[in-house]
Image: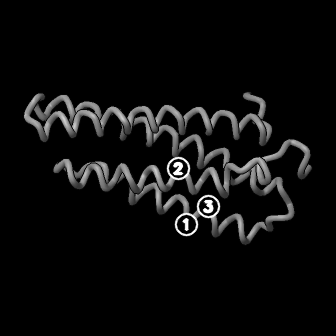
Amino acid sequence: MTKPMTPGQALGALTDQHAKLRDMMDRCEQLAEALDAERIAPDRLLREVARLRLAFDAHNQFEEQQLRPVLLDAEWLGAVRVSSMVEDHIEEHRALRDQLGSAPTAQLRAVIADLRAHLAGEERTFLSGRVLRDDLGG
């Protein structure tokens, strides 16, 4: 059985995943520009978007497993508040994932902008060092 992560370990892992997702989003945007300029075939962009979507799915699964127990461990947040926060957050994940299936490059850029805002919001709220601290909770 795997030892549960400390809040600090979870924060580190999620922060690393966010950096990788941002790199993939940068690559998708570069390929979208190249496609719009007719320098590449659509399949290159579609492959990169598929990679981003898979990485986002894996990140979300990991985050959804780690987030609730870590936040619940920070007793000052309260179980009802944590439950509501996590459920709303999971719904955002689903909506973003569905939008990553959109084809036109303008829509892709809009989804990537939403995804960037989502990651930044996570980092301000859920993944803040003020929330995920090893010295809080049980």
Establish if 65 lies above or below 85.
above
Establish if 19 lies above or below 122.
above
Q: Quadrant of the N terminus?
A: top right
* CB under 8 Å between discs 1 and 2: no
Residue 4 % position (x, y): 76, 36
Residue 88 or residue 65, whichever sits in front? 88
Say if residue 42 shows up in the picture.
yes
Give the residue at x 50% y 55%. Answer: 118
**Type of the residue with mark 2:** Leu
- How far, Cα to Cα, is label 1 from label 2? 14 Å
Residue 132 or residue 64, whichever sits in front? 132
Residue picked out by circle 3: 86
- How far, Cα to Cα, is label 3 from label 2? 14 Å
**Type of the residue with mark 1:** Asp
Report crowding for label 2: few under 14, some 14 to 19, many 20 or more residues within 10 A (C-alpha).
some
Residue 6 or residue 1, whichever sits in front? 6
Label 3 or label 2, whichever comes before in sequence order: 3
Say if residue 49 shows up in the picture.
no
Give the residue at x 70% y 38%. Answer: 10
Q: Which disc, if any, is residue 119?
A: 2
Q: Secondary structure at mark 3?
A: helix
- How far, Cα to Cα, is label 3 from label 1? 5 Å
Report crowding for label 1: few under 14, some 14 to 19, many 20 or more residues within 10 A (C-alpha).
few
Give the residue at x 67% y 45%. Answer: 66
